[in-house]
Image (tube, rainbow, N blue to C red):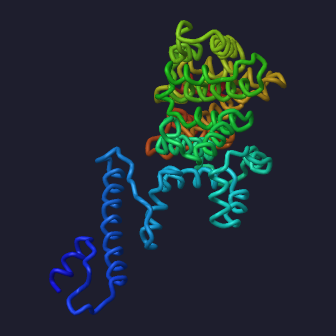
Amino acid sequence: MGSFVEKLASGQSPAGPPNACVSPEQVLRVAEQYRGMAATSSALAQLGAYAAGESDTLPAFGSSTPQAERILSRVLSNRGGLRVYRRLLVEAVQRLVPNTWSQLKAGGANALESWFNSSEPLDAAFVEEAKKERTSGDRSDPVLSTTLRLVQAYELLARCNDPSFTVKTCARARQLRQLLESTGPLTVARRTEEIWGNECTAIGPPVIAGWLVDFPSEASSKVAQELLDALYTKMYACWLTSGTKSEPFPRWMSRRLPAANELPQKSLLRRKELEERWHEGSAQDTCGKAALALNGMPAPESCSMPADVAEAASAWAVGRTQLTDADRERFDVRLCDQFVTKLWQGNSITIPASFERAPVFEELVQETEHRLPTSIAIMRGHCQGRRGPEDVFPAQVVELGHL
């Protein structure tokens, strides 16, 4: 009996135990189960090593009959790519088209399998839902950028670009990526998410060069103009919070734009368009100078401000009453005016260095909690307390009054 058990444990098929207590067919079935357990253990060990990065060899599993082995074989099947990777595409589709995904899922396992392995074009309902503007209240989820990264991750792990692999689901993944990369409204939304998602400190020549090269080449492209709007506004917002009076926006921006010889011809036009959006003496120039002057003002000792700060603030106080309709509609002018207004009120404010997705106007300028009052708040306190030289205090109040 000991020899019989030993052979079973090693996956062998003994002829039968002593006294023929069981039939040869039963022995074979038991032995088959043991062989399956050994194969399953080996496959799981391969999967563990592959997942941990200890091996780059995809786990393999042959055909077998016991249910546990069939399930594992389905998971590790390389015919459709390592199946656990498909979860990346599932997450992508769920985020992009939740309604269409619910309908697909309701069709059952066979319907899902057919859809993922199909090379037929995405149907109109799928594309239409993907194009719709998102109204979700959760603005912390950058849907389009995340979806694209999930699809790209699947293509990488499933080796979709490796000609030695034939993975049916790669065709569907390719369609999803092309939809996200080339469809106008989706392109604008996704790339705008990327622009606002970058930290201000990360925006420099290499990053901007990549964006400009990626922009559509058509000179009048609405997509390109919307992306330039987003890039310009992002850079202007970064300058408002990190710039200094000694570095006007054109100079600040120039240091972050790629050199002309680093860009192809079509991208040079986009670079030039960015630079030409700024004009000396324009509303965004006058307001920007006031913002930097107020934000960088040293703490005063009386109800007064330095002459250069007062001059910049006064110029905008006058300029904002003379805005054209076009200026009032400009996003950068509205942003700067709100920034200056909150500074003048004595609030401690900032514009976050990055956003998970493109922010709405009301989310840009945010008040912060600081123990120490701002320089403007200190000045206001001096004015309210009538602190300052008696011989000049009235004149100082008058000077500040028109602001």
Quadrant in the rendering for residue 94: bottom right
| Residue 385, visible in the rendered structure | no
Decide which of 328, 291 is in the foreground and name it: 328
Instruction: Pick the quarter of the image with the N terminus.
Output: bottom left
The residue depicted at 30 percent of the width and 59 percent of the height is: 45
Q: Measured from the top left, where is residue 264 in percent x and y?
A: 60, 11
Q: Answer with left or right where residue 86 lies relative to residue 278.
A: left
Decide which of 48, 284 is in the foreground and name it: 48
Decide which of 284, 43 is in the foreground and name it: 43
Q: Measured from the top left, where is residue 285 in percent x and y?
A: 66, 17
78 versus 297 height, above or below: below
The residue depicted at 50 percent of the width and 55 percent of the height is: 83
Q: Answer with left or right where residue 260 lies relative to residue 135.
A: left
Q: Residue furthest left?
A: 2
The residue depicted at 69 percent of the width and 26 percent of the height is: 229
| Residue 160, visible in the rendered structure | yes
The residue depicted at 68 percent of the width and 18 percent of the height is: 315
- Total numbered circles: 0
Q: Measured from the top left, where is residue 373 in percent x and y?
A: 48, 40
Q: Residue furthest right?
A: 325
Q: Measured from the top left, where is residue 223 in percent x and y?
A: 74, 28
Instruction: Pick the quarter of the image with the C terminus.
Output: top right
320 versus 106 height, above or below: above
229 versus 120 height, above or below: above
